[in-house]
Image: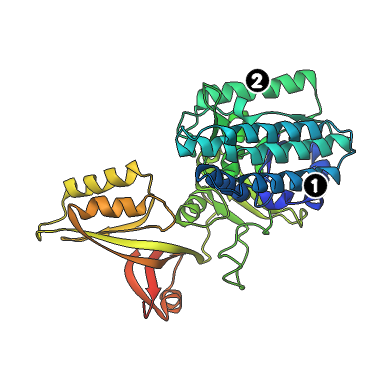
Amino acid sequence: MKVFKFGGASVKDAEGVRNVAAIVSANLNDSPFIVVSAMGKVTNALEEICNSYYQKNDDLHQLIETLKQKHFEIAASLVPKNDPVFDDLENIFAELYWAVEEEQIKAYDYEYDQIVSAGEMLSTRIVAAYLNHIGIPVQWLDARDLIRTDETFREGNVDWEFSANKITAAWHDLQLNNPGACILTQGFIGGTSDNFTTTLGREGSDYSAAIFAHCLNAEEVIIWKDVPGVLNADPKEFPEAVLLNEISYYDAIELAYFGATVIHPKTLKPLQNKNIPLRVKSFLHPDLPGTVIGKDDFKNTIPTFIFKKNQVLISISPRDFSFIIEENIRDIFEQLSERRIKVNLMQNSALKFSLCVNESNGKLKEFIDVLSQRYKVLYNADCELITIRNYTEELSKKLSNNRQVLVEQRSRNTLQMVTTNINS
Ligand code: ASP
Ligand code: MG
C-alpha cells in the first residue's frame, strides 16, 4: 500500500476535489491510504477566527459564516442535495460555534487546536463524500483516534506505540470488513488521551502522512503538490529553477531544515527509519515522475538555494566585557526553548553570541526584553537568511551582490549568509 497526501492547494475548490478523485481512481492498485489537508487558505481563515474569538472582535460570526458558505458551496457542486455530508458539515460548524461561545479561560494554544482543526474535518468529509458518490469506496476515519499525542497544543508530540497500534488495527479492520475500500483521513491533527484535539504544527499534514506510512510499513508516500517535485530553488524567486529527480533523505532533511518549504521538516525521519521512499509529484501532471527522496546514494550535486525572509539577527554580549561562556549559552537557550523560538543559525565569538530567528514568533520581543536585563542585546530586523547547498564562489558572490552580509558560515557543502539591504 501507499500513502497519498493531498495538500490544501490540491483541494482548494470543487475542481480540485474532482482532480484528486481522478488521481485516486487511477491509482487504486496502490491501495492508497489518503491523507488530506484543509482546503486552500482555510487554515489561515481559521487562525483568523481563533484570533477574533480571543480578542472578542465583532467579525467572529461573519468569518465563520463565510467559511461555512464556502464549504457548503463546494460540497453542493460535488454531491446531490440529500447527501449525508451536509449534516456532517453542519455538525462541524455547530462544534465550531460551541468552541467560540465559551469563555476564553483556557490557554490560547489549546483553543487554537480545537478551532483550527476544523479545516481538515471539513475537507475530508467533502472529499470522502465525493469519492463515495462517484463509486470509489472510501472509509472516512477520524485521525484524532489514530494519532495519539501529548498535550503540547499546536505541536503535539506523537505517542508512537499507541498510534501504531491504533493505525494498524484500523487498517486490518478495513481489510476484514471493507476490503477494496480506501482509508481517507485528516492530516495535521491528533488527539490526546483525554480526547482533546491537537495539531502537529503548521503544514503538518506531510508529517501525518509519514506517521501513517511508518506505522503501516507503506511501500511509498506520495505528496501531491502544485509543483513538479523538489526544485533547487523556489521557482517564484528563481525562474531558472530545475527539478531534482532524486535526492537522499539526508539532503532533503537539510533542505527542509534550512527552510525549503516543499516538505515539512519532521516528515523525513519516520520514513528514513523504515526506508520508505517519499515521492513529491504534481497533482496537475500526475504522469510525470516528480522527485524521489530516499537512499543515501542519491547524491545531489546541483546547487540548491533557500531564501528565508523576515529574519531577525540578534547578538547577545555580557555587559562587563567578560567572555560568553557555556553558562551564558545555556541561559540563552533556556529562554529560547521556553518560548519555542527556533534558531535558524547561530555563531559565537569571545564576546558575542549571535542567532538568527524568524520574525514571526510572537514571543520574540519578550525574549529580547528578558535577556536585555542581563546582557547587551542588539538586533537587526528584516534580514534574509540565504542558504546554498553545493555552493560555488561565483554563486556566493552573485547572491550577496547588493546585499550586506552580516554573518556568514561555511561547511564543505553549505554556505549560509544572514544578509540585509545595503542601506538599512
Ligand atoms: N492545513 C494545515 C496548514 O495549512 C496543515 C497542512 O496543510 O499541512 O498548516
Ligand atoms: Mg498545506
Name the image quarter holding the C terminus: bottom left
The one nearer the camera, 382 or 333, is 382
Q: Which residue is mark 1?
A: 74
* Element type where label 2 sits in the image: helix
Residue appearing at x 80%, y 22% in the figure: 178
Asked if 288 appears above or below 121 in the picture, the reply is below
Mark 1 and 2 residues: CB-CB less than 8 Å, in contact?
no
Asked if 284 appears above or below 307 in the picture, the reply is above
Q: Is residue 387 left or right of residue 214?
A: left
| Residues at marks 1 and 2, CA–CA distance in whole angstroms | 33 Å
The type of colouring in the image is: rainbow
State the image quarter where residue 189 is shown.
top right
The one nearer the camera, 110 or 261, is 110
Expressed as whole percent of the image width and height from the top left, the position of residue 238 reads 58, 71
Residue 220's tag is none
Name the image quarter holding the N terminus: top right
Q: Is residue 269 left or right of residue 286?
A: left
Expressed as whole percent of the image width and height from the top left, the position of residue 418 reads 37, 67
Q: Which residue is mark 2?
A: 169
Determine whether the beta carbon of the residue marked 2 sits less than 8 angstroms from the nearest atom of ligand 1: no
Asked if 272 appears above or below 262 in the picture, the reply is above
* Element type where label 1 sits in the image: helix
What amino acid is at disc 2? Ala
The answer to whether residue 134 of the structure is visible from this angle is yes
Badge count: 2
What amino acid is at disc 1? Ile
Q: Residues within 10 Å of mark 2 (few under 14, many from 20)?
A: some
